[in-house]
Image (cartoon, rainbow, N blue to C red):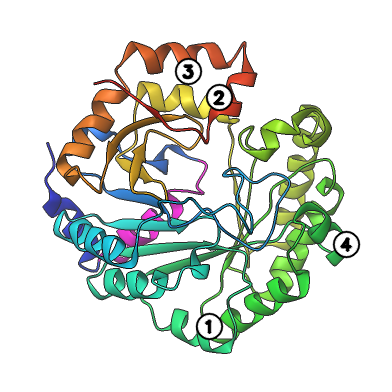
Amino acid sequence: MAKAEDGRRLRAGDGAAVHSLHLSVTDVSDRRGARGDDYDAPLFIAWQLTNRCTANCLACCEESGPARAWRDELTRDQALELGQRLIAAGVAYVAFGGGEPLGVSHCWELLELLAGEGVALKLETDGSHIDDAAAERLARLDSLCVQISVDGATSGTHERVRPGSSFAQTIAAIERLVARARPPQCVFVPNRLNLHEMLPAYEQARRLGCEAFVTGPMMRIGRAAAAWDSLACDSLEWERAVLRLRERERALGAGLRLCIYPWDIVTEMERRLQSPQAMLLIVPNGAVKLLNALPFVVADLRRDSLPGAWRAYLDGWKTQEVRSFVGACRARPELLRHANECWRLGL
């Protein structure tokens, strides 16, 4: 099996390797993740720092919101200690999400700690905390990919899909980062309320100078699962919208990378069941889950070692309980409503 040194080599300055890590969450090819069994430690960490944010987005996978912080979220000291453990294990890439990660005061300490050790980073944000000072601070971090959610080409649509957010703040955050040579990626989640603005949103991202436009089928988990019948696009409508988007990309030529995720969440689970990624998902209290669409918890990093959590993750995918759950989701998509629950998997 590959050792932690593999992660350290990726962190040591291979630009192509680091760029491929940034693509891992958004690329449409099989480069999305390494096979977990090939490694004795994770290469990727997806870390949800908090479940709190300022908005109540209609399609939020984590059902985050202003009063949705978990009571037992990791403290600053616990989070920084875990960051040190990730560095020691040779983890090559950490993606911070939430909730809103920049709403957590120690997020900055984690970003700068990991970046200082050569860890490639991704930050998923709504942009509300990126003022001039924050943009300057982000621009100084090497190997950082910033993804900003923009769910419309107009304030009316964006704020309807993301109640409590500010379209003006989001666009200003993009402009600040572009002005500092740190162009972000624009993330667009399609649904019935905003699909008509996907092309204008793509063109807007291009005008603003974004590095990529990232989209794909809305995930049937979290609030999107609860409102699926009224919110989800018709599959044929989505396919037609993708064709129009690709045609527009060809017409406009180079300048903005287009990343379209090809699968629905059930297909994603089925693929991961056959070939688990070399990654761990850490939720706000330090628990480790198999995937954001699955409720199963396999470890608790407040108590368990990282190597132990990694072994539990690989073993978890092999259990009959997980296989049966994933196998049932195609016929019973209502099971996806359990995604944000935490069921301890007996291993």
- Residue appearing at x 26%, y 76% in the figure: 116
Q: Which residue is mark 1?
A: 135
Residue type, label 2: Val
The image shows residue 284 at horizontal and vertical percentages of 42, 51
Q: Is residue 224 above or below residue 209?
A: above
How far is the residue under mark 4 from the one under mark 1? Answer: 26 Å
Residue 142 falls in image quadrant: bottom left
In the picture, the disc for residue 156 is: 4
How far is the residue under mark 2 from the one under mark 4? Answer: 31 Å
Residue 287 falls in image quadrant: top left
Q: Is residue 49 above or below residue 168?
A: above
Q: Nearer the viewer, residue 66 or 140?
A: 66
Tell me which label, 4 or 3, sits earlier in the chain: 4
Dots 3, 1 in contact, CB < 8 A: no
Tell me which label, 2 or 3, sits earlier in the chain: 2
Tell me the element at label 2. Answer: helix
Tell me which label, 3 or 1, sits earlier in the chain: 1
The boundaries of the magenta stretch are 14-28
**Mark 3 Cα within 10 Å, few/some/many (few <14, many 20+)?**
many
Q: Is residue 118 above or below residue 258?
A: below
Q: Which residue is mark 3?
A: 326
The image shows residue 110 at horizontal and vertical percentages of 33, 69
Residue type, label 4: Gly
Q: Nearer the viewer, residue 96 or 258?
A: 96
Residue type, label 3: Val
Tell me the element at label 3. Answer: helix
**Mark 2 Cα within 10 Å, few/some/many (few <14, many 20+)?**
some
Q: Which residue is mark 2?
A: 266
Tell me which label, 2 or 4, sits earlier in the chain: 4
Tell me the element at label 4. Answer: helix
